[in-house]
Amino acid sequence: MNDPIYGFITIPNSLIFDLIQHKYFQRLRRITQMGMSYLVYPGANHTRFQHAIGCMYLMQKAVNVLRFKGVTISNEEESALYIAILLHDIGHGPFSHAMEHSIVNNVSHEDISLLFMEKLNDEFNGNLTLAINIFKGDYHRNFMCQLISGQLDMDRADYLKRDSFYTGVAEGNINSERLITMLNVVDNELVIEEKGIYSVEKFIVARRLMYWQVYLHKTGLAAEQLLIRVLKRAKQLHDIGEDVFVTKTLSYFFENKISMENFSSKTLEVFSGLDDYDIITAMKHWQNHGDFVLRKLSDMIIHRNLPKIKIKDKPIKEKSIENHISTFMRKYNISREEAEYFVFSGDISNQAYQLKDKRINILYKSGKIVDITKASDHLNIKTLSKPVTKYYICYPKELHI
């Protein structure tokens, strides 16, 4: 297949081909990679499908580089690495993260990815067992687990470059090929050779910039929060017997309280048919619903009439929130509970590099291994390992005071 970023990508074997062809994986064509970010960056309509294929391509590069440097990787391990990275996001729901916070209870996409992988393992006669062990971080060769989930994994190496490409935000355009070329393994741990230190610095800085400029962009954040609230409201109305249009697939998640404890094989099968289109279709209907909250929230998203959002360095004062809530209640003659769907606050946090675990280690020619924060002469790298938290308040534009 032809990728706009990497060019032609070859599928390494028939098992990978069959997994890509499977309906569970094809669903990812209907899940946007960046949720509501297309409302800010019109080009950001790329999908989880494209990202997963890109990750597999980078993993092929990584395997070739490591083998060239004398790291032994068997054919079974190679295939397992491709499968694990290909399927690492298969459990994402509509618009990526919104569903995790609204119509299922504390079920993460990683949990659902694992359930999909186990179901596929049954279908493919146990051929995914090694991939599942690597995905879970249980395999004894730790560097393989780090390639799937670490601070310099193939997931990040693709999404930073891909999201930068589709949003047009050049600051995120990392040199993933250079980073992969500098990979090596020492004592079962992934390291970056000394020559690659500047590429790592660029990678960490790019990650920070992409979070503030793209992933935590205030307009995208406001849109995602509206989406979470519109789904909550629809489910709340459904639960008290109101007539709320839902697609057949979405209705299952409205009629059942889904948590990790009762996420059955039937639930998984229904979930495999759920995608962005279910939510968009429902919201187009909800624009005409009798309930003020559901109607207005849906209309705001569909027509991109997004709320005003202010971001501050300190927590939002209760008085400010109260003023906006009471003004909105009076304006539309609605209850406090209804007004709180439109006026709300929260916080966002950005930590470009985590010092605690899964570190990025630099390998010097002398054989010495040093964490990037100590190896780098870039003043900001250590600073970037500290989390930065900001606080926001959202309220409809008509309340702009």
Image: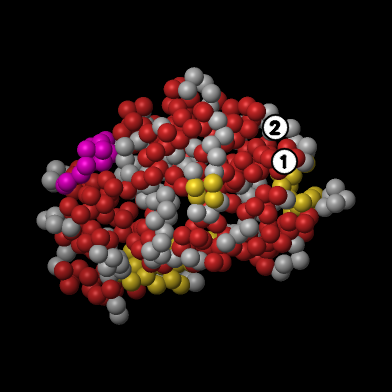
Residue type, mark 1 in image:
Leu
Q: Is residue 322 visible?
A: no
Query: How many neighbours does mark 2 have within 10 angstroms: few (below 14), some (14-19), or many (20 or more)?
Result: some
Q: Which residues are magenta?
A: 244-256
In the rendered structure, does residue 5 fall within the stretch colored magenta?
A: no
> Residue 393: x, y in percent?
37, 68
Element class at badge 1: helix
Q: From the viewer's perspective, tell me whether residue 277 is left or right of residue 112.
A: left
Task: Locate the C terminus by quadrant.
Answer: bottom left
Element class at badge 2: loop
Q: Residue at x 14, y 43 (%)?
A: 241
> Residue 250: x, y in percent?
26, 41
> Residue 378: x, y in percent?
72, 67
Q: Is residue 182 visible?
A: yes
Q: From the viewer's perspective, tell me whether residue 99 is left or right of residue 14.
A: left
Q: Which residue is mark 1?
A: 66
Q: Nearer the viewer, residue 62 or 215?
A: 62
Query: How many neighbours does mark 1 have within 10 angstroms: few (below 14), some (14-19), or many (20 or more)?
Result: some
Dominant secondary structure (helix, strand or loop) of the stretch shown in magenta: helix
Give the quadrant of residue 377: bottom right
Q: Residue at x 71, y 47 (%)?
A: 183
Marking on residue 73: 2
Q: Residue at x 73, y 50 (%)?
A: 182
Give how far apart the Cα atoms at labels 1 and 2 are. 8 Å
> Residue 361: x, y in percent?
73, 50
Would you say the residues marked 1 and 2 are in contact, meaning their CB atoms lie under 8 Å apart? yes
